[in-house]
Image (cartoon, helix red, strand yellow):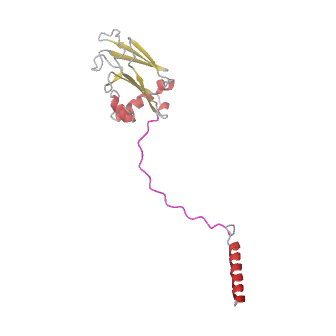
Amino acid sequence: MKHLLLKSKFILLAIIVAFNFSCSTEDGADGPAGADGIDGINGADGMDGNANVQSITLDASTFSGNYTSVAIPEITQDILDNGVILTYLNNNPNNWVPVPCPFDTIAFDFSVHVIHYLGGIDFDYGDASGSSYTIAAGDLNSLRVIIIESSSSARFTTNSKQQTYDQLSQAGIDITNYYQVCDYYGIAY
């Protein structure tokens, strides 16, 4: 019986050793690739972006005299030729006035004329008679400049600025209304 038990252990050990060496990961070829799975459900479209819109806010509380010049390096020749520049001033945080603005606006007791040029903006202040008007530091609080670049397809037309104005008008946006413009482009007030 002892002999049978010894033979059984030897056979069992031989089977285990043979089994370990016969099952290697390197044996056999890979099977064929399975079929691709079904595509998932498309998600909802996100909001349109405003990559072609820049919003610049500056402190206007130091503006004084009858003329102010402000450097805005974002105003490039391409913007002057093809884009739209919307300019707003305020004298309190909730009262944004489009510039140019006439004398009779309820926000200011003076008129503001604006000239956009390469790299900046000039403001001229006037009174009811059209004469020069002098403002004091603190008469204004903030300046907001919204620069809308023309889309690449609009640049090849002769009136890309007008296309931008038309697009805003067709969307029901009054460009003299600061809040409508900000809402349309997703700009924080």
Magenta stretch, residue numbers? 28-51
Q: Residue at x 72, y 88 (%)?
A: 3
Asked whether 24 or 2 is in front, the reply is 2
- Where is the N terminus found, in terms of image quarters? bottom right
Residue 22, given in percent of the width and then of the height, sits at 70, 73
Q: Is residue 44 above or below residue 144?
A: below
Residue 107 placed where, x, y %?
Answer: 29, 20
Q: State which quadrant residue 104 falls in.
A: top left
Does 1 sit above or below residue 129? below
Q: Main secondary structure of the magenta part?
A: loop
Task: Give the quadrant of the C terminus.
Answer: top left
67 relative to 189, above or below: above
Q: Furthest-bottom residue in view? A: 1
Residue 101 lies, in percent from the top left, at 33, 19
In the figure, is residue 128 to the left or right of 24? left
Q: Is residue 161 magenta?
A: no
Left/right of residue 56 with respect to residue 34 in the rendered view? left
Magenta run includes residue 35? yes
The image quadrant that residue 173 belongs to is top left
The residue depicted at 42 percent of the width and 40 percent of the height is 48
The residue located at (33%, 32%) in the rendering is 180
- Res 13 → quadrant: bottom right
